[in-house]
Image (cartoon, helix red, strand yellow):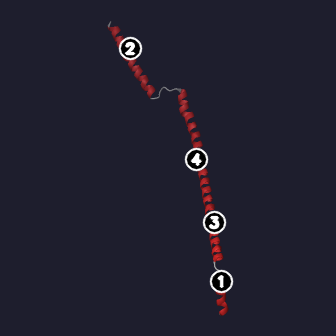
Amino acid sequence: SKKVAARGFAHRYIGDVVSDVFGNLANSGFFYDPLVKEIESDFVPWLLDGVGSSVSGLLEAQALLDNAVVAAVASKDEKAAAAEAERLRREEEARKAAEAAAMPPAESGAEGQEEQTA
């Protein structure tokens, strides 16, 4: 009966020790799934490299597009400023022509009389 009790105690004690040992070994990475290891060591780095190069290509394309948009807006602004300056110049010319046409002929005649008396 003591042997049976000792055997039962040893069996339970050894069972706990064995499960603790295997648990510690599994937690430390001693046992691993080959598929998971291959995915972690080969596939994921390959995938990250591919995504990284794609993202850097997209960033370069975005920078080029941003530069093109900035240049187009600047060109449009320059053209609009030139057109506005031309419009103002024409308005000024028209105003001067209208003022010259509105001048009474007496002023130009008075100048002529002064020249004749001199």
Q: Residue furthest toward the bottom? A: 118
- Gap in Å between the C-alphas at discs 1 and 2? 133 Å
Which of discs 4 and 1 lies nearer the camera? The answer is 1
Secondary structure of the residue carrying tag 3 is: helix
Secondary structure of the residue carrying tag 2 is: helix
Q: Confirm or deny contact between disc 1 and disc 2 (CB under 8 A).
A: no
Q: Confirm or deny contact between disc 3 and disc 4 (CB under 8 A).
A: no
Sooner in the amino-acid sequence: mark 2 or mark 4: 2
Which of discs 3 and 2 lies nearer the camera? The answer is 3
Q: Considering the image in quadrants, where does the C terminus appear?
A: bottom right
Q: Considering the image in quadrants, where does the N terminus appear?
A: top left
Q: Is residue 101 above or below residue 65?
A: below
Q: x, y percentage for residue 100? A: 64, 76
Sooner in the amino-acid sequence: mark 1 or mark 3: 3
Q: Amino acid at mark 3?
A: Arg
Q: Amino acid at mark 4?
A: Leu
Secondary structure of the residue carrying tag 1 is: helix
Judging depth in this view, the residue of 36 and 19 nearest the camera is: 36
Determine which residue is flagged by label 4: 59
Judging depth in this view, the residue of 35 and 56 nearest the camera is: 56
Kindly identify the residue that appears in the image at 66 percent across and 90 percent down.
Answer: 115
Q: x, y percentage for residue 82? A: 63, 64
